[in-house]
Amino acid sequence: MHLSVFVEGRRIASRSFCSAYGKGSARVVTDARGRAYVLLDYSVGHGSHIASDLLAIYRVDKRLVRRGTLISRDPIGPDAEASYHYAIKMPRSGGLKFIGTLKVTGQRTALDSAPLAPTRLRIDMR
């Protein structure tokens, strides 16, 4: 798959990426100082209830600079999964702050993996 960022009809950055089952989406957010970031949702892994969803954070510059990766969805057992949702804060000093929350859905069993704790991540302007 291919991700391209356009400004006023001109491509300013692009990146190829792989995603399980061709699943992927992106959105652009701007921090308090006007710097743009691309949030790319994609999947990894193949098989019945095995694929995980990730959120990659890229700073838009002359190219896309990867600044971090967060997990969005992860199977923790045959019929259960952990879903992570992130509130995005925009500090006045610039950058982004992600505050994660966790929700477990599906039928849990004693053999399921424990879900990972929600993440707090600060992406600065560097």
Image (spheres, rainbow, N blue to C red):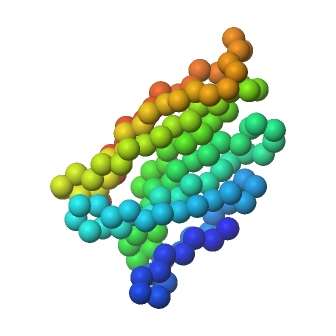
- Give the percent coordinates (x, y) of residue 29: 38, 62
- The answer to which image quadrant residue 50 occupies is top right
Name above or below for residue 8 compared with residue 1.
below
Residue 54 x/y as whole percent: 57, 47
| Residue at the far bottom in the pictured view | 9
Camera-side residue of 88 and 71 = 88
Specify whether residue 59 is in view.
Answer: no
Residue 120 visible, this angle: yes
Give the vertical position of 124 relative to 98 (above or below). below
Q: In the displayed structure, does residue 26 sit left or right of residue 28? A: right
Residue farthest to the top, as pictured: 110
Q: Quadrant of the C terminus?
A: bottom left
Q: Residue at x 49, y 31 (%)?
A: 102
Query: How many numbered markers are drawn?
Result: 0
Up-down relation of residue 61 to residue 69 (above or below):
below
- Is 82 left, or right, of 51 in this rendering? left
How far across and how far down the image is residue 49, in percent?
A: 76, 36
Extreme residue in the front direction = 106
Name the quadrant of the N terminus.
Answer: bottom right
Quarter occupied by residue 7: bottom left
Q: Which residue is drawn at the image coordinates 22% and 65% (left, top)?
A: 33
Q: Name the residue at the right extreme.
A: 48
Lateral position of residue 60 relative to residue 115, left or right: left
**Residue pictured at 56% horizontal, 55% vertical:** 41
Give the camera-side residue of 90 and 124. 90
Residue found at x 43% / y 65%: 28
Q: Position of residue 78 (x, y in %)?
A: 76, 26
